[in-house]
Amino acid sequence: MKEGCVLTYELIQEASDRLRKRVRQTELIASPHFSDQLGYPLYLKCENLQKTGAFKLRGAMNFMTARDRSELKQGVTAASAGNHAQGVAYGADLLGVPARIFMPESTPPQKVQATRDLGAEVVLTGANFDESFAAAQADSQRCGTVFIHPFDDPLVMAGQGTIGLEMLKELPDLETVVVPIGGGGLLAGVAMAIKTTHPQVRVVGVESAAAPCMYRAIKDHRISEVPLGLTIADGIAVKKAGGLTTPIIRELVDEIVLVEEEEIALAIVALLERSKLLVEGAGAVTLAALLNHRIKGPLGKTVCLLSGGNIDVRTLALVVERGLLAAGRYLKLRIEMRDTPGALAQLATDLAAVRANIHDITHDRRTKGLVMGTTAVQLLLETRGQDHAREIVAALRQQGYELELDEG
């Protein structure tokens, strides 16, 4: 790559030729359920089905295959919390190139192991991505390896932009494209690929409200670090937007919107239940934005990009429970009642009468503040949704139970 190279449509076309037999052209599937729910045709671009479970393979592979093999003889170095790591590791293994990946110490073990299984050396260092990134850059300079940036590089952006070309090939009359944002490499590449030939297509980016680096960069007209909150969309939790990606996004992207944690969790659950697709938090932000009407105005034929599916089982279990709680499919209650024989059995009978299934129950007579002769019952109930949950609460109150809702 020549010095001063910038992202162009031609660079994306070259990437498409280069990657044709090296990455999966992922499925673009119609979603009848979500189309009916939203009132317009919705299609899902399934990068969660990519060879490494995420779109990052495209940028990493394009970066490496665009270079002369002699440039890579010392190896490649990268920093990542997961998806970029696996993309670099997969590509390096395919090309027979040594790869060293720096990952935060808090990275889930299965992501670390998945990267090692692809042949890369993993160095766990730093409390967060930014510290791992600094360590990786320093190591690359010291060892003379090629550093592969996760997003702020024209060849990486061009690789991600091939997704946009695939969308247009399969759906040339698309009207709106919704894309996740971390540092901006994916959105910049897709926007360039689409807007160059189809400027009328609306391109919208989505970030977690807990990590709004690009939203702030565009709104404030300057790139700066933003504090990160806890988010299940860890794959797009970036403190600072890219210096190369931001100007492209400012010029080509029509709108950037934010989504909340509960909305992301609900979108993950909805994709599992309705589309049978496993999608990580970063990949589900796009559907979350659509389901919660964050994007205003008519959207027409819309493509929702599901950028990845690398979610660990423990996180998935927590997310599903949180999503079910938010959807009213779980109901948490605390009831104080008389501590007499048969009282608990009567409560179970009253719950059965309204078709509430007891998932978990705790019976505690030793809680501080309880009146003598009473007991506290904590309940986790399975319901059919918000309306059913309200029906259960109303029925219990009508029976004389004093209860408190637990929203946690």
Image: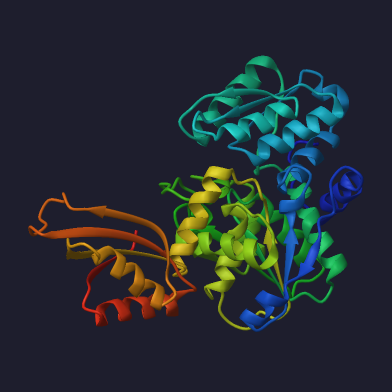
Q: Is residue 375 visible?
A: yes
Q: Residue at x 49, y 64 (%)?
A: 263
Residue 379 drawn at (x, y percent): 33, 61
Q: Quadrant of the N terminus?
A: top right
Residue 370 drawn at (x, y percent): 11, 57
Residue 331 lies in what quarter of the image?
Answer: bottom left
Query: Which residue is outermost to the top?
Result: 143
Residue 342 drawn at (x, y percent): 25, 65
Query: Which residue is outermost to the front?
Result: 341
Q: Is residue 105 above or below residue 30?
A: above
Query: Which residue is outermost to the left?
Result: 372
Q: Residue at x 45, y 45 (%)?
A: 225
| Number of residue marks | 0
Left or right placement of residue 142 versus residue 96 in this view:
left
Looking at the picture, tell me which residue is in the foreground, 365 or 245: 365
Q: How is the image coloured?
A: rainbow
Q: Is residue 373 above or below residue 302?
A: above
Q: Quadrant of the C terminus?
A: bottom left
